[in-house]
Amino acid sequence: MHTQNLEAHEALMRHWGYTEFRAGQEEIVSHVAGGGDALVLMPTGGGKSLCYQLPAVLRQAAHGTAVVVSPLIALMQDQVGAMQELGIDAAFLNSTVGLEDARDLEQRMLSGAVTLLYIAPERLLTARSLALLDAVHAAGKLSLFAIDEAHCVSQWGHDFRPDYRALNVLPSRYAGVPRIALTATADSRTRSDIAERLSLQAAHQFVASFDRPNIRYAIASKTDGRNQLLKFLLDEHEGEAGIVYALSRKKVEETAAWLCEQGVDALPYHAGLSADVRQRNQARFLREDGLTMVATIAFGMGIDKPDVRFVAHLDMPKNIEGYYQETGRAGRDGEPASAWMLYGLQDVILQRRMIDESPADDAYKAVQRDKLDALLSLAEGHDCRRVRLLAYFGEASTPCGNCDNCLGGGASEQWDATELAQKLLSCVVRIRQHSGISFGAGQVMDVLRGKRTPKVEQFGHDQVSTFGIAADASEVTLRTVLRQLVAVGALRVDADAFNTLALEPAAKPILKGEQKVLLRQAASETGKRERGPRRERTPRTRESSSATKLAALEASGELNAEAIQRFERLRQWRTETAKAANLPPYVIFHDSTLKTIAQIAPQSMDALSSISGIGERKLQAYGERVLELVLDQN
């Protein structure tokens, strides 16, 4: 084995306790540790962080500190704590660091003692920080720059942050210092933009598979969102940790409160809450079992909690990149997890309106419409969700056999909705011609289905030629067609009090029969689900969530009765240890490591050291206590 690769394997075992790299990691580590620039695309849970952390360790003795540029100020303490648990000297520099501590940190950097420094882009670009890096660089103690969440630099990405643009000063100001930019999500356009904006056109690009085979994708039409969500939680993920995304702050707070009323332990998170409340709720989610976080997209980036069992979307995101990034927060531990989404006509209308009313130029708006259309195609598609999702990122695949469509629960065959679309478009035209004004979706539906409502009769719409021409179509079907027509730009929903409909130029080829409208046939066109008597439920507690996890282990046969008892003792100890250190429990040991310990029941430090996930620092800090818990017969 090459000397550098041997050193990498030894460091991987010494600090992380792993004997093997994950797919793609070793090549990236070798390239960056050798001084090469890199652009890395690797899915959430694929091990991106190690791709800069390990090179930082390997380069530290000769080159000093690696600077990690990250927007995750609220998580920096946990990130640094995780490194320190591995025996790696790490620090962060942000507004919470006092002047005296900052000066001490600067001196340690100048001496090359710090392996990793985490800093936000806006802090890095201050005169004081740049002066510090200038001095560190002049002393030959600047090892590398790692730009995490690199999609934030691109206007085409789903989370653009202007501060990232100024990072293009790094290659000229700190010539010779290697740079690695990393993200979990970027289509080809965003990837090119990242490379250009960060002057990484010549960097080696490492693109891992975007496939997350442990995640089951399911998408359904929105009929009764809250109750659909509750049914999903109770049927599939009761007692488990997860994230529920909603578009508005109001919806986040109302949904979290309602779930609590239903016995689900839920917390809200959005940018309108105070910093203290956000920090407290985030800390609880990371440190406790079985909590549901209801949030806007302000929550989630950098969340390393491995046992998130589901990510649910109550509203449709803006694009596939955002959807993929958010759903990727589920199942980081490789265990089965769910990505569940509802979408409806109002979602499409809102997203289209946000694009149309944005101050951006026409080229940007056109790209965003294309991205929205791609997401709607994913939602409406009758074929494998995973195949479509991966195809968006340029990756070929075969049907997964695990998504709702493959399993037969999401859709059956595709059907040709062109004729129905023509009727709907014609009805919008006829109503406008008859009354001289436009109307909203509800009136159009009533006219198409031949319903003589007071409003229909008031305006004489029962006399137009399109009255009743779609009487055999359900309102759910018509709304599905309408949603598709809005998404492809054939219909416009005007931003007035009534959300009135108007035809766009894209309607012409559909009306002339030159363009088909193909939709998936929903497996069920029922509206609200029928509900029996409401069950009396009590909020979940840590104890009940723990019992759920243990019961699942026992049912799976993964651990026998004695091993389950050991596992529970280990988990209780881990919780207490993490609380004392103010860290999330998984930073101490992942569940997978505890399961292996419980199953093998090692009798010595040597035996314990052979278990994956136990490096030298953790063996020294926790080994004796872990063995005591394993040998405990009580």
Image: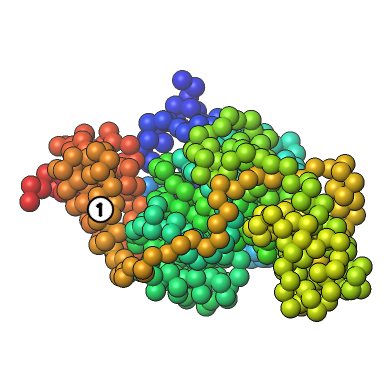
- The residue at 72%/68% (across/down) is 451
463 in relation to 342, above or below = below
342 in relation to 624, above or below = below
- Apparent side of residue 497 relative to residue 256 in the rendered image (left or right): right
Q: Residue furthest left?
A: 634
- Apparent side of residue 606 relative to residue 172 in the rendered image (left or right): left
Q: Is residue 209 visible?
A: yes
Label 1 crowding class (10 Å Cα cut-off): few <14, some 14-19, many 20+?
many
Task: Tell me which corner region of the image, top left, top right, bottom left or bottom right, holds residue 495.
Answer: bottom right
Residue under label 1:
571
Tell me residue 551's x, y (percent): 25, 50
Tell me residue 65's x, y (percent): 53, 49
Q: Amino acid at mark 1?
A: Arg
Q: Nearer the viewer, residue 578 or 169?
A: 578
Please tell me whether mark 1 sits on a helix, a strand or a loop. Answer: helix
Q: Is residue 76 visible?
A: no
- Apparent side of residue 296 relative to residue 198 in the rendered image (left or right): left
- The residue at 44%/47% (across/down) is 337
- The residue at 77%/54% (across/down) is 485
